[in-house]
Image (cartoon, grey):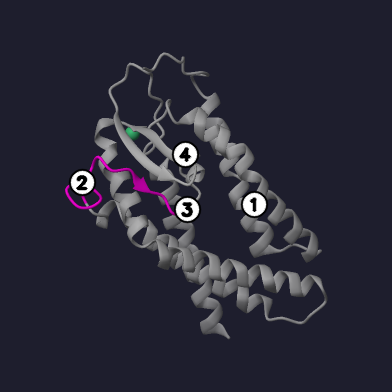
Amino acid sequence: MTSKPVPAAGWTLPATGILLFLFIPLVLFLFVGHPEPVGWSLAAGVALMLGHRFLARPYMRWALPAQCLWCNRRLAPEDASARLELATGGGVLAARCCPAHREPAARFFRWVDRWRWPLRLGIFVPLLWLLGALAATALGRIVALPAVTSLFRLVVGLTVNVAALGPLLGPQDAASPAPSQPIAVAFPVHNFFLLGVRALLWVFRLIGVWWIVLGVRYFLGR
Ligand SMILES: [Zn+2]
């Protein structure tokens, strides 16, 4: 039933994914670096964060049949691949993986599903706190913005490193949910298709460790 041609071979698809991924560090720069005027950085960051999905979701539909979700390798319709079903708010997505790459991807998504509440709290509580501190600063209130920013780096750095343990520590196929059952995805699923999960997790590990170091140095140096 794969009669639809896969569009745009070559570099167009991965280059678009990288371009769309760059929105995320840009938003983080606006929030964490908050260049003056802080109010404009906050407004631009929120607008980019909310608008990103309108570009990233069509990209995901484009990438879904054409790339390995784990390593981002292009997969032609006739190439051997394994199917990984992900349950999202918008329905079940059938992602493709190289035959050897279904297992690490599935373990990662099961891990994130199992730990979804600590991971959500580890991202969204520091984020909301930082956005609140930026809004207060923009309104002329005196807040401890460097401390809030350092705490954001520290907690988010730890959280994304826990998420990145998924391919190693996530439940294997035999465990629940059963292999035939779609794995629920607790976070915006389109972001996992931009670079492929493997490269995204390396970004998590490296930036996460750097943020942990910066956060610890700030609080020890106070
Ligand atoms: Zn692959």
In the foreground, 51 or 76? 51
Q: Secondary structure at mark 1?
A: helix
At 67% from the left and 67% from the top, the residue drawn is 131
Q: Earlier in the sequence, mark 2 or mark 1?
A: 1
Q: CA distance from mark 3 to mark 1?
A: 14 Å
The residue beneath circle 1 is 49
Relative to 1, is 136 above or below? below
Q: Earlier in the sequence, mark 3 or mark 4?
A: 3
In the foreground, 192 or 110? 110
From the top left corner, tell me how far across and down residue 105 is, in percent.
32, 44
What residue span does the magenta drawing correspond to? 172-186
Q: Amino acid at mark 1?
A: Met
The residue beneath circle 2 is 173
Q: Residue furthest left?
A: 174
The residue beneath circle 4 is 193
- Label number found at residue 118: none
For the residues labelled 4 and 2, say whether their Cβ atoms are less than 8 Å apart: no
From the top left corner, tell me how far across and down residue 136 is, in percent.
75, 75
Q: Secondary structure at mark 3?
A: loop
The residue beneath circle 3 is 187
Q: Is mark 2 within 8 Å of ligand 1?
A: no
Which quadrant of the figure contains the N terminus?
Answer: top left
Please tell me whether residue 178 belongs to the stretch shown in magenta: yes
Q: Earlier in the sequence, mark 4 or mark 2?
A: 2
Q: Secondary structure at mark 4?
A: helix
Q: CA distance from mark 3 to mark 4?
A: 12 Å
At 68% from the left and 81% from the top, the residue drawn is 144
Q: CA distance from mark 4 to mark 1?
A: 17 Å
Q: Is residue 193 left or right of residue 40?
A: left
